[in-house]
Amino acid sequence: MRAFVPARADLAATLRLATPVVLVQVGMMAMGVVDTAFVGRVSEHALAAVGLGGMWSWGSMTFGLGALFAVGPLLAQAHGAGDGPAFGRALRRGLVLVVAHSALAIALQMLCEPVLLASGQHPEVAAGAAAYVWRTIPGTLPFYVFAVLREALQATHRVRPIVVVIVAANLLNVLVDYALVWGRLGLPAMGADGAAWATTISRAAMCVGIVAAAWPVLGRELRDWSRAAFAWPPLVRISVIGAPIGGQMLLEFTGFAAMMVLMGRLGVTEVAAHQVTILLAASAFMVPLGVSQAAGVLVGNAVGRSDAPGARRAAGAGTAVGVGFMCVTAVLFRAA
């Protein structure tokens, strides 16, 4: 265990990379918080619809997002080893897998209303949630593309452009929520549907922004496509690595989703209140998730340069920072 004890330099490196990564994670969650704040002033039914619809939309993408996390360490290892061709192959294969995971997520999103009705949700809320989900479907593929290109930039320690993109997307989300949820700037008030369109537009903007940010650095890798990107054995290997990550994230999310469904069986007010509460818990969870991604990059870089002791210390530093933050969060939540 002593081999995993990080030095001060390891902790500093983890914090230096984790801080912007965490900002991105929190920024992604902030969109849901903003949607809730706007829709909460419309009606309980609208807030409940956004809560259940957002749960289903996000849940349908959770497995894919987790599975695509497997691409990050491969990119980090290739970067650490200075192997540009391997980096490009991993990036392109990640984008190929994006298409497959998008298709799976969209298929699941289409099942929203019948499953919610079968679970005993209020028919009006189930219909509103389904309408919300259908309007977020066009943002699924762009969101996955953003996730993979973000992993590529993080692997090369270029995180500032990602922060800029996520901040801009959040500002756009606020503007579109203001215009479409409440009916401002000469546009009709759409309530929960407006929040769904705000999410879709923001995700599309994130994709465009990350492509623009990555192109100067990764343009060659994004242009240089060949049959190797579609080779089945490497795609299967990445999927085998990513499936347990996606499964673990899906199981975690299922616990939150089950509570949301149970609240929905109690009533509209209960599920609306639960939506507010669970966003606070989920926002706190984004911090250790971001720290884990940063630690994965540092471990991958160390593995790539054949630095086994450095990889162990980086893993220890990530664990210390993540656990330490959640201990503080637990105390704050208990005190509040």
Image (cartoon, rainbow, N blue to C red):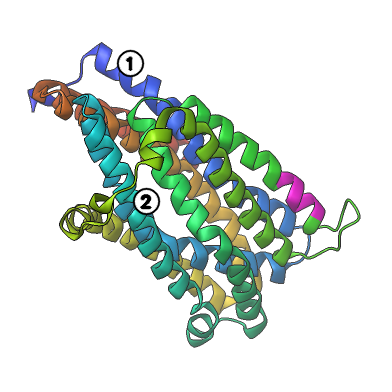
> In front: 296, or 159?
159
Tag nearer the camera, 1 or 2: 2
Q: Give the range drawn in magenta.
A: 174-179
Q: How many marks?
A: 2
| Element type where label 1 sits in the image | helix
Vertical relation: 233 (above or below) 292:
below
Vertical relation: 296 (above or below) 198:
above
Residue 146 is situated, as x and y percent measured from the top left of the image, at 47, 46
> Which quadrant would residue 191 be assigned to in this image?
bottom right
Q: Does the magenta stretch include residue 176?
A: yes
Q: Locate the N terminus by quadrant.
A: top left
Residue 325 is situated, as x and y percent measured from the top left of the image, at 38, 32
Q: Are the two marked residues, 1 and 2, in contact with CB atoms closer than 8 angstroms?
A: no
Secondary structure that dominates the magenta span = helix
Say which residue label 2 marks: 95
> In front: 263, or 181?
181
| Element type where label 2 sits in the image | helix
Q: Locate the C terminus by quadrant.
A: top right
- The residue positioned 52% from the left and 80% from the top of the image is 116
Vertical relation: 28 (above or below) 244:
above
Residue lying farthest right?
A: 186
